[in-house]
Amino acid sequence: MNHINHITKKLAIVLLSGFTLCNFSCKKNFAETNTNPSVVTKPDINALFSYSVENLESYQGTEWIWENLEQLLRYTQHLTTDPYELSTNINSRYRTYYNSILPNLFAIRNEVATRADKDRYKNINAVTYIVQILHGLKVTDMNGSIPYSQAIQGRVDNNFKPVYDNQKALYDTWLKELDASLADLKAGGSDQVNFGAADFFYKNVWVNWAKLANTLKLRIAVRYEKQDLEIAKRIFKEVMTDATGPIDNDDAGQFVYDKPEHNPIGNDIDYRSPRFGTSSIVNFLKSNNDPRLKIYFSPNDLLGNFKDVLVANGKTLPSFINLNDPLIMYQGGPADWTTDPAVATYYKNAFPVSASVSYKLMSTINKKFFAPRYGSNTTGKMLDYMVTYAETCFYIAEFVQKGYGAGFDTKGSAEDWYKKGVTSSIKTMNKIAVNAVSATGFEGNGDAEIAAYLNQPGVRFNGSNDLERIYIQEYLNFYRLANEAFTFCRRTGYPKNSSAYYARNAWNEPIPRRYALDEPPVGTNNENWLKAQQEQGFTPGNKELQVLSTQRLWFDKNSPNFGGGN
């Protein structure tokens, strides 16, 4: 980890100053091009694209360890672990964007613009925008204002001091670019050039790229909701009335990274501390017989004849455990360990039964589900679903339930979309588990198990707290998408404190609602950085947790506090 941090710090110095790095692996003589402008090359567009989309995923080992498993998923209470400081290793998303994703996408468009048959590259151009917006959303979600409209201009235009576009400007620009991409993808004829094997996501099925673009529009819409509801409604209508529509299936439609050798987490799954289930999520999954319980969490030691062993040794389990619970092997505890130290002590201390027997009482996260090849495991692969059909369904269900679908065809009721979302979520999570050679929620197609789940009193629509039910299922679906989970909890305030349906655990510590974006090296782009920080109402350079927990990003300014949903 220290080695990774050393490298990324060096990269950050270049990126934050406004310079850009090229992909030296794609074209051997790129280095010569950078130093000798008179050398003209014809880059391989497919290689450029492959490098950019590969980097959507390849950097995430650092992100999983230093952010997702240690910070974001703890703040959302999907899991709990020892609290640690916000390491300097966070925010690799930012560095990756400017170093490894944007440069080649710009290079593709610059190259296409010089070709006589450039009209045959409209689909390729369109997709480059979709890719950079996909990751750009992730970058601004934690950083707010970032360089975009003037980014990557150092090499061509000698602009090494790009402005930082504010979040509203980013959203508006991305909506226009997505609309333009959609128009080109729909208009493209049979003569369009494709990426060949470089498009290992959608294999040049352009309609799937168009559907992804529409789902990204929905991602922007839910972020716009608390700032300008009318724009959020307009985006929703545009997506639902578009003939192509958003992602609409579990098979080819979802945006998934699928490579057998991919192993981003590996043996760092327990880096610095093991990860455990919280009582809120574990108890909800148990009470509704959720098929994802066995997928998300591992059983404790209360298996087999443990009751006989307890009786033989005159031992009684701690009071927080119900001895008659049929799912007693799954136990969660406080998200914030300081709120219930008597229970939290069992996270790291086994329950002593005899001199030779002790039982681990708390459920850890299912490590193989996250890291199929950690330890001595040699089978299984990690599928990373970056944008899903379930996410799409829950956004639509949200908006229909709130009444935003008046006057046009929403292609189903809020309940219809809710059921589609739940079904897709469970099936997708089970597919991830199958590929990881991990514990699964069901065998076969799962239709019977999912139908039974949807009929659970705690799951089916009841006419009173239906929006909360949509929210909670959306929340459960984000178990493997930490950025979306954290954004969801910020924008909605769910899970809600003291809810009778699904209550957020008690929590004592401040939670940062953004990252502190480092100042560029002195003499580079300091003025634009400082201006952006001040315009957002941030204390420039301050990384104190209390400050980061109170100074919010633009999309988040009108959102409830964590647990303050209404």
Image (tube, rainbow, N blue to C red):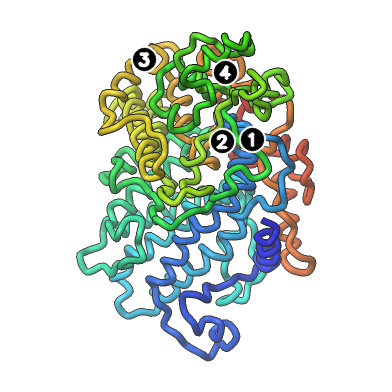
- Towards the viewer: 446 or 131: 446
- Amino acid type at image mark 1: Lys
Q: Give the left or right position of residue 366, taking residue 248 as reference.
A: right
**Nearer mark to the viewer, of 1 and 2:** 1
Residue carrying label 2 = 227
Which residue is at a point 51% across and 39% down the rendered structure image?
367
The x and y percentages for residue 560 are 62, 27
Name the mark nearer the viewer: 3 or 4: 3
Q: On the image, numbered disc 3 is attached to which residue?
A: 456
- The image position of residue 440, as x and y in percent, is 38, 33
Question: Amino acid under label 4?
Answer: Ala
Real-space CA distance between mark 3 and mark 2, rounded to the nearest whole angstrom: 36 Å
Which is closer to the viewer, label 1 or label 3? 3
Q: Are marks 4 and 2 in contact (CB under 8 Å)?
A: no
Q: Nearer the viewer, mark 3 or mark 2?
A: 3
Residue 235 location, quadrant = top left
Which amino acid is tagged 3? Gln
User: Can you give x and y, in whole percent of width and height, for residue 418 in the image?
Assistant: 36, 26
Which is more foreground, mark 4 or mark 2?
4
**Residue that mark 4 sits on:** 503
The residue where tag 1 is placed is 557
Residue occupying the point 75% across, 49% down = 534
Q: Earlier in the sequence, mark 4 or mark 1?
A: 4
**Amino acid on which disc 2 is placed:** Gln
Left or right, 524 with reference to 208:
right
State which tag comes first along the sequence, 1 or 3. Answer: 3
The Cα atoms of the two marked residues, 1 and 3, are separated by 36 Å
- Gap between marks 1 and 2, in whole Å? 8 Å
Say whether marks 3 and 2 touch (CB < 8 Å): no
